[in-house]
Amino acid sequence: MSEPILEMTDVSKRYRTAGGFGRRRKGFLAVDGVSLHVERGEALGLVGESGSGKSTLARMANGLVVPTSGTVRTDGQDVAGLSRRGLRRLRRNVAMVFQDPLASLNPRQTVRQTLENVFRAHGETTSTAELVALLESVGLGADYLGRYPHEASGGQLQRVAVARALALKPDLIIADEPTSALDVSVRAQILNLLADLQRDQGISFLHVSHDLAVIRLYSDRVAVMQRGRIVETGPSDEIFRSPQHPCTRALVEATPEAELPA
Amino acid sequence: MIVYIARRMVTAVFMLLAIAFVTIALFFGASKDPARAMCGKPCPPETRAKVSAYMQTDQSAVWQYTEFVKGLFVGRTYGEGAQQVHCDAPCFGYSFPNRSDVTTLIAERLPVTLSLALGAAVLCLVVGIGLGALSAIRKGGIVDRFSTGFAMFGLSVPTFLVGLLVVQVFGFMLNALPYSGFVSFSESPTDWAWHLIGPWMVLSFILAAGYIRVTRTQLLNELSADHLVAMTARGASTRQVNRHAVRGVMVPVAAMFALDVTALLGGSVIAERVFSLHGLGDLLLSAVNEADLSIVVGVTLFSAFLIIVGNLIADLLMPLLDPRIRRA
């Protein structure tokens, strides 16, 4: 079996907190000795309540957050050992989709400029045909190229954000709560889109969410986080059927009974 | 675009006419009599009436206004015979105390005020944006602490106090800078700058404070903005990201600068007083004291014109900086 696309070993992240008079700066341990891996072509769901450290953990995969200790190997490279240029090259291959599409797209740039920026960042040029094909792969028409973010809906914008991630064909996409800012009605569409990309293009996913129902349907495996630690991992169905840890049980119970449209 | 500019220009003309009317009406509401100031110390009522008729200040405000507007197109003639004075076609009025038409007076004083305002504008933009950007980049650092305090001080201290302090410290105590006088640029550029350093410092000290604040907050917002994190996450270099951040900062700075044209003109009135520079502000102040209506109206209109043009330029610049405005 080939090397995992992402492998984290015993990583921790301590954030500095503001000190006060006579108070010791203890810091806040957001991630506490976590190990996890994502196989090539796999979708790993990372669930946990808010503040459990899942976003911090996800952002260590592409070097946006530097771990206090432990090693992160992404795409066969030790992220800590990468130069600036090396990091940029890594990010060509590891893309990210953020929670709020309206915030994560530059309000002063058209969709075309946003997409072109990805190519430009890596010294590549692109053609209109290529950009149109990119938009079509996320289910948007060519007319979106000339639009500004405020001229499209949340679901459409998140598709643009996915298109930005897909430009230059990445191997791993980190999706940080990609649907929690969206209306329920378009959530399923975006999730289906991501699932199709995993299946058809063999892209690996690290899918962060607080919603176990979402994770269950679109991830092969699930890791449950609580207070900076992973408390339970396993195949999605198994976790859902027989949750072992109390935290997982609470998340499962919080999930509505009705099935999401697949 | 051209239609837009044309429409703005037409609006501006009407606005200026309205401003002229308000100025004249306000002036006539005041109790000062222009003829009184002109006719000298022993001033018998007959002489005073004669002077008043000669200067045409015996007429009503409405009459003054229509004469003023007419004068803009066909010129204006005061008095008769040997005492007759004529003011050519775009006539903004005639100043009897100065024995000159207002247009000439403004043109004479303009280089001083322009030197003062332009230099101060450049200085406050450079200092304001520079310090603001540096403090945003190293938030909580020494530069940040210094410039935040500096901005607080600048916003709360009145211009004349800063002016007097600069004159006192640099002019008298250190003897480092001239504390009055003006040398024209064509005469000697170095002397020109040398004489203006003090006034520039005073004017830009107050104005830079605003730019420090706006640049700092706006850049901090931009640098932590999701869309720039997203750019970084997709592999953009720091330089590419910074370029986008700077664009986001330029819009509010440009908007603020348009409003500050007013502050520059207003501040220069005080700075001119403190440094005994004979610019437009000084002209206006003495005209108010001498009840010289023509100059008051002329300078007010000219300042209003500059402000309107400044705002127009800012409005035209805005869509270039932020394409969203272009669509709206």
Image: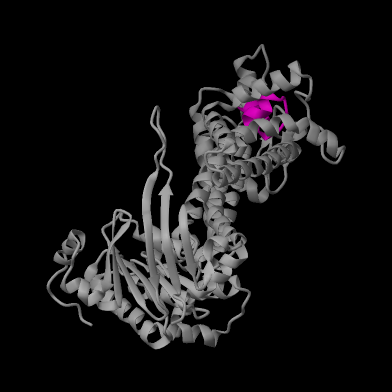
Q: In the rendered image, which quarter is residue A219 located in?
A: bottom left
Is the stretch drawn in magenta largely helix, strand or loop? Answer: helix
Asked if residue B283 lies in the magenta stretch, the reply is: yes
Can residue A85 be spotted in the picture?
A: yes
Q: Position of residue B222 (x, y in %)?
A: 50, 54
Q: In the rendered image, which quarter is residue A142 located in?
A: bottom left
> Looking at the picture, does residue B158 appear above or below residue B66?
above
Tell me: A136 left or right of A127: left
Can residue B230 be spotted in the picture?
A: no
Q: Position of residue B12 (x, y in %)?
A: 54, 53
- Who's the residue at 51% across and 71% down the image? A114
- Who's the residue at 59% across and 31% down the image? B57
State the residue in front, B218 or A225. A225
> Looking at the picture, does residue B7 appear above or below residue B36?
below
Asked if residue B131 lies in the magenta stretch, the reply is: no
Image quarter hosting the N terminus of chain B: bottom right
- Who's the residue at 64% across and 14% down the image? B43
> Looking at the picture, does residue B275 appear above or below residue A210?
above
Q: Position of residue B21 (x, y in %)?
A: 51, 41
Coloration mode: one colour
State the residue in front, A172 or A133. A172
Image quarter hosting the C terminus of chain B: bottom left
As drawn, the residue found furthest toward the right would be B187
As drawn, the residue found furthest toward the front would be A1
Q: How many numbered markers are drawn? A: 0
Q: What is the magenta range?
A: B269-288
As drawn, the residue found furthest toward the top would be B42
Q: Position of residue A75 (x, y in %)?
A: 50, 73
> Looking at the picture, does residue A131 appear above or below residue A65?
below
- Who's the residue at 48% across and 74% down the image? A111
